[in-house]
Image (cartoon, coloured by chain):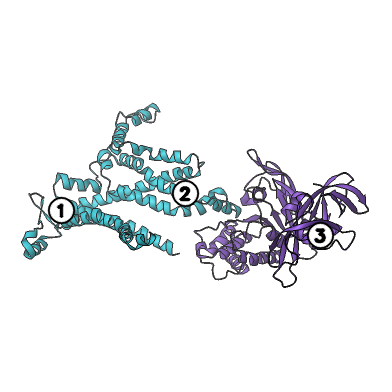
Chain colours: A purple, B cyan
């Protein structure tokens, strides 16, 4: 990932792709709902969400396969909402790759170039360049069905990049690969994107994939963007219960603000009081939610060391051994289950803290997030 | 259970299933064909059956030798010497080729339209294509005689529209033959085309559009090449039976210019020349094997790629 690349933080930067109030309906179903989004030149942007959230529809709107019912899609300042797909400087890599079975690898890559009426020599040079880019030199004469899944994926990528699109759209590009190849291809895609500087918009349902690859992630649910942020911000500073729950694992503890101290909100929940870093606009009496990630919860036999830390007493009901770490389930007041993750930093085969042990779960105020939505 | 099934009678059953198509072809194609080949090598005779020699098992080895000696290629020589036969073959070739092209031109848009219908309507369209088969083929051809005759529906309609002053003689012409053949064989062209077009992946057309192809060009660059197997199947399925077609040219066509099926019929039933008729049939089979072999070759090449 390129360090210091954050045009979205620059108020003066102009977006390459700007969606304003874009809506798309299928009958009664709202697939995309009055959506606003800016994507910047050279950005690797991921659309992440559960299936049916509208992320694929959004990608198809960008490609031109669907036209929005409302709103505008601006590419470099020009509204392309009504421009047909064959006139958009945007290309797509399909989930199923959609390679033409009757054409060779070279024929597939040259397909888009032929539509531009480029000269034969220019097309051949560009095809050779693309084959080299995806490391498929020498396979230009093969037919798609003679290639492995990974090779087909590269041909699809080369074909979509051959026309030098302003934006490359990738629909679940790694979904058809096996797990090991997927991890390798993730890094290759990131390197390729950094080298070419092309704007990538990727749709995925795999949050790990989005986290590893993208500069920013837009999390979608029911046709709306719930949060658009860098991966670390999305994880550490979710803006709602839904996003906190969707990205990674989290303990969501419902409560009410009892008092405000400078920078700290005291929340009454589970029969006790918890100190959490305050969010702007939170006042006493507001019902809020404390979100704390399992790895930020410490499990100890003794009460908290620092008096400012929050403490929850309970008993261990389940331990899941995952190799690098162990996942604890602890039953606290009101039968509420809290999850804690402990790194297995030393070699031992029995858990350091066993089943049914009375423990104290602690977390520092700055390690929890106060959510109002 | 499984083991016994595989080891015991299972082997017999599997062998039978594997051999069944071969046995079927041997019994109902190869054997009759060999009989026809034998008759084509015989001479006509005023007897029952109307040719010699006939094979007599009782005569033993000497009888077999006499039998073989009596066979001759005389019928094939006649086939080559009389221009009538060549003319009939050429006529069949012309009718089969022209009809296949017309069928393709009419059938492709129909099949394409069907494949693009909403999935709910496709079975209905399919039934509509097959529906004419529910009426006897002969009745439908007689209906065409009715439609095309001097005072028939077609001439009446043309006159009513003011397109012609005097009725046109449609019957006993090549036009009538083409109308009858195209009408009768259209389902055989539409069905294989539809089966191929219906399987075309719509994403490929989106990919073509994405790469800068307007819809009409995507049709020529993607849809048409991908439907080639359907085109080949449809053309073969029409060309081969049309080549040997008898009923339609006999009922609708001009008796001065006959197709090979009609010549064959005449030899068998009018001239009672079974050997000549058999020779005509053997050569016909030979001619029709050619497109099938070519198609097989092309397919084997496509599979190898």
Question: Left or right of A210: which side holds B236?
Answer: left
The mark lying in front, picked from 2 and 3, is 3
- Which mark identifies residue A313? none
Callout 1 secondary element: helix
Residue A150, given in percent of the width and then of the height, sits at 58, 65
Question: Left or right of A12: which side holds B100?
Answer: left
Depth check, front residue: A157 or B106? A157
Callout 3 secondary element: strand
Q: Residues within 10 Å of mark 1 (few under 14, many from 20)?
A: many
Residue B280, given in percent of the width and then of the height, sits at 21, 53
Q: Is residue A233 above or below residue A131?
A: above
Residue B262, given in percent of the width and then of the height, sits at 22, 45
Distance from disc 2 to disc 3, alpha carbons, whole Å, reads 67 Å
Distance from disc 1 to disc 3, alpha carbons, whole Å, reads 106 Å
- Which mark identifies residue B197? 2
Label 1–label 2 contact, CB within 8 A: no
The mark lying in front, picked from 1 and 3, is 3
Of all chains, the one bearing label 1 is B
Q: Is residue A46 above or below residue A349?
A: above
Label 1–label 3 contact, CB within 8 A: no
User: Quarter-wise, where is residue A44 in the image?
Assistant: bottom right
Of all chains, the one bearing label 3 is A
Of all chains, the one bearing label 2 is B
Q: Which residue is mark 1?
A: B275
Identify the residue at the far top of this view.
Answer: B160
Callout 2 secondary element: helix
> On the same chain: label 2 and label 3?
no
Residue A226, given in percent of the width and then of the height, sits at 75, 49
User: Quarter-wise, where is residue B81 in the image?
Assistant: bottom left
- Which mark identifies residue A360? 3
Q: Earlier in the sequence, mark 1 or mark 2?
A: 2
């Amino acid at each position: 990932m390129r360090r210091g690349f954050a045009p979205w933080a620059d108020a003066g930067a102009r977006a390459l792709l700007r969606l304003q109030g874009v809506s798309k309906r299928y009958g009664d179903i709202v697939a995309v709902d009055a959506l606003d989004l800016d994507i910047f030149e050279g950005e690797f942007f991921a659309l992440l969400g559960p299936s049916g959230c509208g992320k694929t529809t959004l990608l198809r709107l960008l490609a031109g396969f669907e036209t929005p019912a409302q709103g505008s899609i601006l590419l470099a300042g020009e509204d392309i909402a009504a421009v047909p797909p064959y006139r958009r400087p945007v290309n797509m890599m399909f989930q199923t790759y959609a390679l033409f079975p009757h054409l060779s690898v070279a024929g597939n890559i040259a397909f888009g170039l032929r539509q531009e009426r480029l000269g034969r020599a220019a097309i051949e040079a560009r095809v050779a360049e693309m084959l080299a880019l995806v490391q498929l030199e020498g396979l230009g004469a093969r037919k798609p069905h003679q290639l492995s899944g990974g090779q087909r994926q590269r041909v699809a990528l080369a074909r979509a990049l051959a026309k030098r699109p302003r934006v490359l759209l990738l629909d679940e590009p790694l979904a058809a690969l096996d797990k090991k190849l997927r991890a390798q291809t993730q890094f290759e895609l990131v390197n390729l994107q950094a080298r070419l500087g092309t704007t990538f918009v990727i749709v995925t349902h795999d949050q790990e994939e989005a986290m590893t690859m993208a500069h920013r992630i837009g999390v979608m649910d029911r046709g709306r963007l719930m949060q658009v942020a860098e991966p670390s911000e999305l994880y550490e500073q979710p803006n709602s219960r839904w996003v906190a729950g969707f990205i990674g694992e989290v303990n969501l503890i419902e409560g009410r603000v009892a008092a405000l101290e400078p920078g700290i909100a005291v929340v009454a929940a589970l029969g006790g009081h918890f100190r959490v870093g305050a969010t702007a606009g939170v006042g006493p009496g507001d019902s809020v939610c404390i979100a704390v990630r399992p790895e930020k919860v410490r499990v100890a036999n003794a009460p908290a060391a620092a008096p400012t830390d929050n403490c929850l007493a309970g008993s261990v009901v389940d331990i899941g051994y995952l190799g690098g770490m162990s996942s604890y389930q602890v039953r606290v007041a009101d039968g509420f289950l809290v999850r804690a993750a402990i790194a297995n930093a030393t070699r031992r085969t029995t858990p350091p803290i066993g089943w049914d042990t009375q423990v104290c779960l602690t977390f520092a105020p700055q390690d929890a997030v106060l959510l109002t939505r | 259970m499984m083991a016994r099934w595989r080891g015991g009678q299972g082997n017999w059953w599997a062998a039978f299933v594997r051999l069944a198509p071969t046995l079927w072809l041997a019994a109902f194609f190869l054997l009759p064909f060999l009989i026809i080949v034998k008759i084509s090598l015989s001479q006509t005779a005023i007897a029952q059956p109307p040719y010699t020699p006939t094979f007599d098992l009782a005569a033993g080895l000497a009888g077999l030798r006499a039998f073989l000696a009596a066979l001759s290629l005389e019928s094939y020589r006649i086939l080559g010497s009389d221009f009538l036969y060549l003319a009939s073959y050429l006529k069949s070739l012309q009718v089969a080729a022209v009809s296949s092209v017309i069928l393709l031109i009419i059938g492709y848009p129909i099949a394409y339209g069907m494949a693009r219908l909403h999935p709910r309507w496709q079975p209905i369209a399919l039934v509509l294509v097959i529906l004419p088969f529910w009426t006897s083929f002969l009745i439908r051809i007689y209906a065409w005689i009715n439609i095309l005759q001097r005072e028939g529906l077609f001439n009446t309609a043309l006159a009513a529209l003011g397109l012609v002053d005097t009725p046109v003689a449609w019957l006993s012409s090549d036009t009538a033959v083409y109308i009858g053949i195209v009408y009768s064989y259209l389902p055989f062209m539409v069905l294989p085309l539809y089966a191929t077009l219906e399987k075309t992946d719509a994403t490929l057309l989106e990919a073509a559009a994405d790469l800068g192809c307007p819809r009409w060009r995507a049709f020529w660059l993607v849809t048409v090449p991908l439907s080639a197997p359907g085109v080949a199947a449809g053309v073969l399925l029409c060309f081969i039976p049309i080549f040997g077609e008898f009923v339609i040219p006999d009922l609708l066509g001009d008796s001065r210019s006959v197709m090979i099926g009609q010549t064959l019929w005449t030899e068998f039933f009018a001239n009672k020349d079974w050997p000549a008729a058999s020779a005509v049939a053997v050569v016909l089979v030979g001619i029709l094997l050619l497109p099938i072999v070519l198609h097989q070759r092309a397919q084997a090449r496509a599979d190898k790629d």
